[in-house]
Image (cartoon, rainbow, N blue to C red):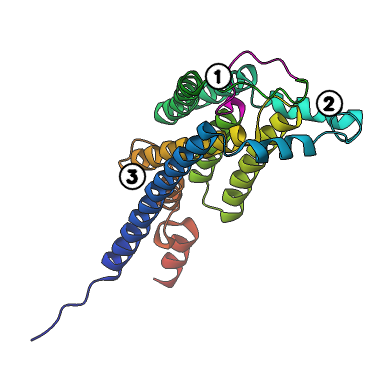
Amino acid sequence: MIRLQPTERARQAMSWLGRHELSTLVGFVLIAAGVWGFVELADEVLEGDTQSLDRAVLLAMRSNDDVTDPIGPKWVEELGRDFTALGGVGVLTMITIAVTGYLGLQRKGRAALVVVVAVVGGLVVSQMLKWQFARPRPDLVPHDSYVYTSSFPSGHAMMSAATYLTLGALLARVHADRRLKAYFLILAALLTLCVGTSRVYLGVHWPTDVLAGWTLGSCWAILCWLIARRLQRHGEMEGAEALNDRSSEQLPSADDRPDAEIQRRVHT
């Protein structure tokens, strides 16, 4: 009995499908792990088991002689305020408007919608959780930034993770170069880390508030990335694969080039 071997195109299709299904599975596993981690952390916070750790980390960022003075020179304090502004509502709103406007001009409405859902949805979830837990702000040190909501989870940490990681993932999706993909994702992660750390440095959040914000914001960004990926696979968003396919379609074949036609006529 003759066994039919799959063609090269079929093997490539199966490889592509397996790779994409695996990444989807990994994404859902990370979301499940993040949600589980947040629930466990929230339970520890409500029971007061994290109080000693929170106090130790918060005081470690203050001068030994004066807890009202953050460690480092004055320019470091100013740098902390600069970084914390990157996770504020005003800055994130302007970034969202700028990005959605650009995507709209590029006629990429689906991608613009993903960005809006990532930012607005993350803000709604953050505010609802703050209202639900109603954890008081740190009272060990004076606040070096104005605050008007409860402490858990950190809105700046969650919103910076949801916004910057989503934008980094979208930019990585529309570029085939792995170096550019890594650059966008690393830059987004660094911005998220700087914003969250600045909240503890300025004394307006407990460390566990920031950790919870990072966890939920990352889960939200992964969910938005999965949505964007699904839209791209159904041809409703343009990704790196589509760009590559379009570029290859636009390249003329050897038989269609003018020089090939001239050589064909000479030989005949």
Task: Please report contact status of discs 3 and 1: CB closer than 8 Å, yes or no.
Answer: no
Secondary structure beneath dot 2 equals helix
Tag nearer the camera, 3 or 2: 2
Image x and y of residue 144, in percent: 78, 20
Q: Which residue is mark 3?
A: 233
Q: Which residue is mark 2?
A: 78
Q: CA distance from mark 1 to mark 2?
A: 27 Å
Secondary structure beneath dot 1 equals helix
* Badge 1 density bin: few <14, some 14–19, many ≥20, Cα 10 Å: some
Q: Nearer the viewer, residue 233 or 51?
A: 51
Q: Is residue 111 above or below residue 181?
A: above
* Badge 3 density bin: few <14, some 14–19, many ≥20, Cα 10 Å: some
The tally of labels here is 3
Nearest to N terminus: mark 3 or mark 1? 1
Q: Is residue 174 above or below residue 126?
A: below
Q: Can you see residue 238? A: no
Q: Amino acid at mark 1?
A: Ile
Q: Residue furthest left?
A: 1
Position of 4 compared to 148: left or right? Answer: left
Numbered range of the magenta stretch: 145-156
